[in-house]
Image (spheres, coloured by chain):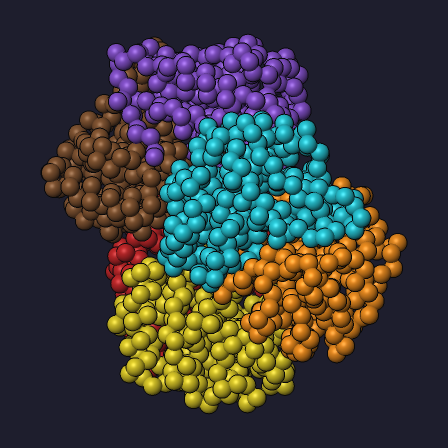
Chain colours: A yellow, B red, C orange, D cyan, E purple, F brown
């Protein structure tokens, strides 16, 4: 039941918005976790998803299509590639395979890297969603702060301006809120991770990498699902 | 700074007691996390360690020898192979490399697998040490219970009797304390993990596997150390 | 903006499962909160809902239809008549009116009636959903216990057997878990409330009554919505 | 035991200071919660009370007179009209009717309106009393801040200066302390509530209204007292 | 301002019930904390107090007489000799000297002696008072349990029956609730302390001793009062 | 087993660094707690200790020598005179006598003097050690802040500059972090205590005084050790 050389295991990472650019950005960030003999990691795009997931309406609208996509695309583990973790409870209940949300995985990874994490959010409107998720996970006292870039998801790939803004927000999280580890609060910021770590001197968690790594851990060690 | 194919990275796992049998048991449990192209994982024994680490005197007596051993044996990451995590703070402060204790790694892994973990301890006397560690990590509310086998570390490898006793204690942790994930509270119980998972129907964390996996995660994703 | 005599205010309570019997049971329980000159309280049934909401699939499937129903049926305040509070975040974000879930309202009401509440759940499978909701609301330390009847939603109206079972479960919540107030964990149990209070000697919260009362409070006092 | 049309139920609200102006202010604020067919809500003044309740000596001096007043004035529910909730434990133990303090009722109401409440206190000296109350109620993590106006209770009715000062303090609670709901920390500020909500854009809780509403809820739903 | 040999310092311990037997029991328990050259420790009885303090009415009725007694009897520090800590907030606010309640002092002392304390209460009716006090002090997570003897305060001095009952209740606190330190929840049980420690093998805190010791600490070290 | 006049009891306070000046400073601070007829309080220096204990290496290097020193120097109670509490768990497990660390004793004493304490640390590098200790003791919510002087241990006795710097840091702890009691985070600052109390108007805890006082309490009241 564990993952050994020779097995053909497969992790399916689904971007529930319809932006191919975001999927490509996730795919590039995952290059780091791919190893020869390790699981195949495939990134797919939910075609019926909205251009970006910015409202609760966007979140709810992708829940059923996302789980239907998982149910019709066999894999050994699944990753939901959106920082609102849409459909996580449903996918866990319906599938008999491990499923990981990128937000919960980032919170978990960051909890092992430092005492209190700071979140670089995209838009202010998503912060209440993050808070509900963090409270439901029992991690409230590990949160240092959550601050928005106020940049649209689709603008996230214009590197110079975005990088400067992430560094600005990250500096506030570190120096005002007391974060000793940062989380990139969106699936599309992975390309900035290395540069942000260097400039801010803190570990920086890309949520898609964190979730894929957690899927690999789970498959490698063959953990039984909690009931 | 991240781990890619072709790199010759090395994780050193040190058993701070002098029992070669315990080291061999850890080595066998780690077979699961070794992958072709992945890091070399080496298990060593601290020759000056006591036969088993059962008292606070044993814990304190290995702190300096263990860190000296690490300092003179270069590796990319280090694992302290004792469920009391001896020398963890010192190793982290002295070395410029990632260091993981098997207890803290098991607590962290279990926190991602279920809501509340139960610990199968070896002896009653180690439970206050576990409690101090869990409180210092801020994980008190994730602990369901900690129950001792009352079997000596060196007897841990007599499989039939030990397995029956672990199942008995694990059943109490699950049914009385409400644990939905179990932790094997010693470096020498890895060989029982699969059978216990099957009999109890819960995910079971071997701490040595959890720590080695965490070291691999860290090297793979190239996280900067928290200050 | 507040509710005074002469205003024609209206509270819409929507049962998101398609059982007319459940809607009728809610309607009867609400008789207690209707007053002359007070708001009109209307109970409606979501026709496209499942027969009962027992799985996460059921929960997710009613989110969008429920909010669409609210959007096309003007009212001054809305109540979501299912103990999983489906669509609450979305309804709050989309509508410009107060929206209340019956579970969160029951937890809130019970927190003002005693120190620790016990939940009489219908089925075991809904308990993880309750836990996520309670944790997200920051009320974990007010929960004494959550125990299932293991009776189907549609069987809930066969009074003799059901009443005996509720009393049995309520007794465990009171005497084993230490609850000093009970919550009926379903929209269809309101008819048993008086008898359970008498037999167990504790205050008992019907969630539909609690939510409607909270809506009346809100309209009466004219509170502005939190941002 | 529940409140229905035709019943002649009565809620007695007692101002334990001797200021008729404060009683009149409370009475005016309660106009909002009076409905035709609803309970009669009567505001009385404790003649032997001090001019204002600003010290612990004032608080303790009214405990017995207040409870004696309640015992000799039959009602269906009682409200203690002072933000220090003097005599609440005694009144609950002695009377066989529901009793509500305006401070605890405001904290409870605010907990259902937002995540973290800010308190507009009258004088700095009352803040330790508020803190003891909030801690005893287990609501510490819902408190954003508590800031004093430093205006005497009897000056509270000079509207222009007081209103400006409340807005100033409320702005600090919102913008510095992060409150998303405000509580007026005195029985005499109800007249300012509407204007403050408008200027600050947050829900504002008048404690006397909150307590009277809670009494109505209790009578309407006929809850049994917790043991 | 500190206590040195030669100073004539005086600690006044007031029993707010009128039982001379209880005062004599407290006086005997304090023999242990009297040292040559140390402060004079005087035990007095509040003559207007009730025979025993068992109800909230008793508690409230002694608040003002107790503080008046303190105000008219000069001392360097004051101890309130009743496990309900009546008048503590008022005495602290009015007097310019250190004041200690025996319950809060016992909770504090016990927190330094073990992880979780058990309280041997006299009567069930006082437990909600203990809970409010413990919550207000922020010590909820240090409480293992609170179990009543159900013996009247004035019967507390009939040693054989009372001792057997205390041991019985203490055994439940230790073995069922997990207490590792016990608190005698009344001013009149000091005479049993030594025997209970011997029989149960746990440290046992007499609250009057704890409070007097704390007063001595305070005078000896000359701490300034917190604002 | 308790301490009475005529007993020749002895408390051994060990400075685990080799600085005689620090030992002399501790000895002077303890003058306040010595009383005629009270226990003999002896301060000794661990000759093999480092000049100051500033790193985790220093901490670990003194654990075994310190406990060996205690084991070979009989006393009735022991105090570990370093704010990192080195060897506390080991000394408690090995000796059959009460042992107190000065840091844990200061945290405990401060918790009884105010709501939230501020720590005046020597160097930034020791703050993570303080945090681990505070978390393991379950006192996280009593900590207001921990701010470093950034002065070497051996420079601590140059009074003018050091005093000014302590006042500066203490002011920040009081006014920015909200501390209402201060702790001097080193064994060598006792000489400044009185002046700091006067200038800042807050109670100030010298940890060595706190630990010696706690040892006296323990011996005086004859508490049995918790298991």
Placement of B115 over or under A193, stated as above or below? above
Q: Is residue D108 visible?
A: no
Q: How many marks?
A: 0
Q: In which quarter of the image is the C terminus of chain A?
A: bottom right
With A145 as the anchor, is B96 left or right in this view? left
Residue in view at x 42 percent, y 85 percent: A154
Q: How far across and how far down the image is residue F17, in percent?
A: 21, 38
Q: In this view, does F140 lie to the left or right of D206?
A: left
Residue D1, picture quadrant: top right
Residue at (44, 35) in percent of width and height: D54
Judge left or right: residue A116 versus residue A214. Answer: left
Q: Which of B2 and A162 is in front in this view?
A: A162
For the N terminus of chain A, the image quarter is bottom right
Q: Examine the rendered structure and indicate whether residue B98 appears above or below residue E38.
A: below
Towards the viewer: B35 or B153: B35
Question: Which residue shows up at 24% across the image and 37% down it?
Answer: F200
Nearer-the-camera pick, D202 or F144: D202
Q: Residue at x 57, y 71 (%)?
A: C96
Judge whether residue C35 can be spotted in this image.
yes
- Percent x, y of residue C31: 79, 57
> Which image quarter: residue F41?
top left
Image position of F118 with respect to C93: above or below: above
Query: Looking at the picture, how far across and down is residue A133, in whole percent?
Result: 52, 65
**Pick the front one: C126 or A218:** C126
> How far across and down, in percent of the image, does residue A3 sit?
52, 75
């Amino acid at each position: 039941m564990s993952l050994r050389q020779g097995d053909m295991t497969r992790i399916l990472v689904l971007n529930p918005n319809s932006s191919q650019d975001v999927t490509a950005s996730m795919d590039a960030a995952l290059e780091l976790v791919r190893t020869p003999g390790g699981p195949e990691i495939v990134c797919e795009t939910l075609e019926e998803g909205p251009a970006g997931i910015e409202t609760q309406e966007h979140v709810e609208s992708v829940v059923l299509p996302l789980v239907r996509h998982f149910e019709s695309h066999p894999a050994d583990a699944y990753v939901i590639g959106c920082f609102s973790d849409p459909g996580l409870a449903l996918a866990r209940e319906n599938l008999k395979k491990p499923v990981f949300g990128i937000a919960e995985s980032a919170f978990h990874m960051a909890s092992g890297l430092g005492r209190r994490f700071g979140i670089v959010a995209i838009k202010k409107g998503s912060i209440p969603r993050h808070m509900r998720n963090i409270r439901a996970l029992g991690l409230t006292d590990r949160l240092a702060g959550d601050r928005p870039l106020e940049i649209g998801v689709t603008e996230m790939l214009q590197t110079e301006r975005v990088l400067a803004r992430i560094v600005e927000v990250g500096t506030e999280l570190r120096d005002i809120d007391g974060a000793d580890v940062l989380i990139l609060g969106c699936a599309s910021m992975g390309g900035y991770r290395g540069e942000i770590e260097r400039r801010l001197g803190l570990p920086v968690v890309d949520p898609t990498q964190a979730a894929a790594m957690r899927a690999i851990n789970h498959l490698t060690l063959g953990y039984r699902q909690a009931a």
